[in-house]
Amino acid sequence: MAKSLLLICRQSPWAGTAAREALDIALAGGAFELPIALLFMDDGVFQLPVGQQATALEQKDLSANLQALPLFGVDDLYVCQASLARRGLTDATLSLPVTPLHGAELPALLARFDLVMTL
Amino acid sequence: MKFAIALFSPPHAPASRRALRFAEAVLASGHEIVRLFFYRDGVYNASCAMVAPQDELDMAAQWRAFVAEHRLDSVVCIAAALRRGVLNAEEARRYEREAISTGAPWELSGLGQLHEAAQLADRLVCFGGD
């Protein structure tokens, strides 16, 4: 059986290529039908709110890549609730159906996976 | 034990030196490295165009020597490499660039190689950040 991978995305969408390159790992794994989950944490939660205006920064919108996740079979998605709260995003509308995790649920999530990768 | 090692940081980041020393220790302890995978700014470790000051460690050269000596399977993510100007002869020709900045012993390939290595190895160890 394939090993499961949890990918922890900690970078904001507009801080260089980190967020995009983390998503590329998830999409590539999804294409190979590997069991992959994503946890958005720290500044990584900035990837999730809807209504981002990438063109104002002359950037390509990351939303398309995010929306591609379920199409690639990557639909095991989590967000760190404390990271959202710290950034005033608790009530924000998010572009993906992510499961919010609190406190001790985070280490429990990490323990469920064979592999953990942080970007 | 079989190790897959991924590096996300450039040669001038301490993470690059730590990753190489770890890889050396893995082999010295009698373990196996199934693949080295270079991603994000880690692709710069495969560049032959970087010039380290004389009194500083030349990590790109050290990686090159290590990979060549042990004939390791060493893959550089092609998308990350193109974005950062790390091109082998084939890619330089394809994109009509004058400079060739990588070559043997490195192989340019896709992210599937990272997943495959992680699946084949008993341990995936990633080095990133500073």
Image (cartoon, coloured by chain):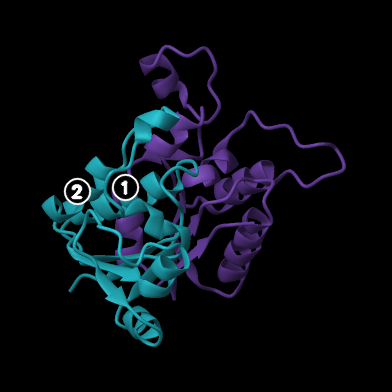
User: In the image, residue B83 lies at what x, y percent?
Assistant: 45, 31
Query: Which residue sits at x=64%, y=56%?
Result: B130
Mark 2 and mark 1 residues within 8 Å of each other at the beta carbon: no
Query: Which residue sits at x=22%, y=53%?
Result: A95
| Residue type, label 2 | Gln
Question: For the residues marked 2 and 1, what is the alpha-carbon distance in whole angstroms?
Answer: 12 Å
- The residue singled out by tag 1 in the image is A24
| Residue type, label 1 | Asp
B15 over B65 or under it: above or below: below
Residue B1 visible, this orientation: yes
The residue lying toward the viewer, choosing from A33 and B101, is A33
Give SS at disc 1.
helix
Picture colour for chain A: cyan
Give SS at disc 2.
helix
Q: Earlier in the sequence, mark 2 or mark 1?
A: 1
User: In the image, residue A110 lies at what x, y percent?
Assistant: 36, 79
Query: Which residue sits at x=44%, y=76%?
Result: B1
The residue lying toward the viewer, choosing from B61 and B7, is B7
* Chain purple in the figure, letter: B
The local crowd at label 2, few if under 14, some if 14 to 19, many if 20 or more residues have their Cα within 10 Å, is few
Residue B120 visible, this orientation: no
User: In the image, residue B73 lies at what x, y percent?
Assistant: 44, 51
- The residue singled out by tag 2 in the image is A67
Query: Which residue sits at x=36%, y=35%?
Result: A54
Tell me, yes or no, whether dots 2 and 1 are on the same chain: yes
